[in-house]
Amino acid sequence: MTGAAVLGSGAACSGQRPTAAADRLKPCPDSPNCVSSLSSDPRHRVAPIVYTGSPAGARERLLGVIRSMPRARIRSHEGPCLHVEFTSAVFGFVDDVEFFIDEAEKLIHVRSASRVGYWDLGANRRRVEEIRRMMTRALTEETDP
């Protein structure tokens, strides 16, 4: 199982507003086209994004990073949740990326999954790692005079 224990009532960032750790992100399906920081399965596992400062500051940095990325469309951003759609350049496939800012742990949990198909050739994992690099760079630029 890939994170089902943290789902609680089944609410996710794309559903009703989560308020506790039990309401984080949906688990990945068995297909290899999904990654999640809440997965215990090494095939799907990615590290959460660590942040410093306030949750509001982390949220603004994350929104800035997303806005700078090509073919990204912010679908919603309420409270600790952010839902983004990324569209591939060639075939127009859509991937859903959800973020949950965990204020208590100073982590941004992430789930990135293809809407259709089975294989993603590592696209979701690469995207999450690129977002991590960009978040680190944004934080470094904020703290360096």
Image (cartoon, helix red, strand yellow):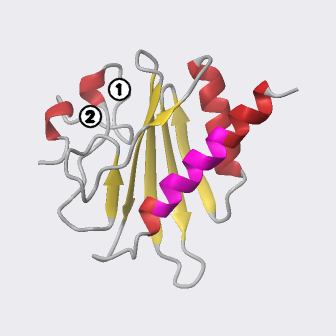
Q: Position of residue 95 (x, y in %)?
A: 45, 63
Q: Which residue is mark 1?
A: 18
Relative horizontal placement of residue 115, taking residue 51 as reference (left or right): left
Instruction: Assess disc 2: are there few (<14), some (14-19) or many (≥20) residues with their C-alpha within 10 Å of its C-alpha.
Output: some
Is residue 90 located in the magenta-colored stretch of the structure?
no
Residue at position x 29%, y 40% from top? 38
SS state under label 2? loop
Residue at position x 72%, y 53% from top? 68
Q: Which residue is mark 2?
A: 11
Q: Is residue 45 above or below residue 124?
A: above
Q: Amino acid at mark 1?
A: Pro
Q: Is residue 105 above or below residue 134?
A: above
Relative horizontal placement of residue 84, taking residue 30 as reference (left or right): right
Residue 21, quarter of the rendered image: top left
Per the rendering, the mark at residue 139 is: none
Q: Amino acid at mark 2?
A: Ala
Magenta segment main secondary structure: helix
Q: Nearer the viewer, residue 62 or 122?
A: 122
Q: Is residue 25 above or below residue 44?
A: above
Q: Position of residue 105 (x, y in %)?
A: 41, 20
Return the residue found at the far left: 1
Magenta residues, as a range?
Answer: 126-136
Mark sitting earlier along the chain (2/1): 2
State if disc 1 and disc 2 touch (CB < 8 Å). Answer: yes
Residue at position x 27%, y 44% from top? 26
Q: Position of residue 102 (x, y in %)?
A: 42, 24
Distance between mark 2 and mark 1 Cα atoms: 7 Å
Q: Position of residue 131 (x, y in %)?
A: 57, 50
SS state under label 1? loop
Return the residue found at the far bottom: 90
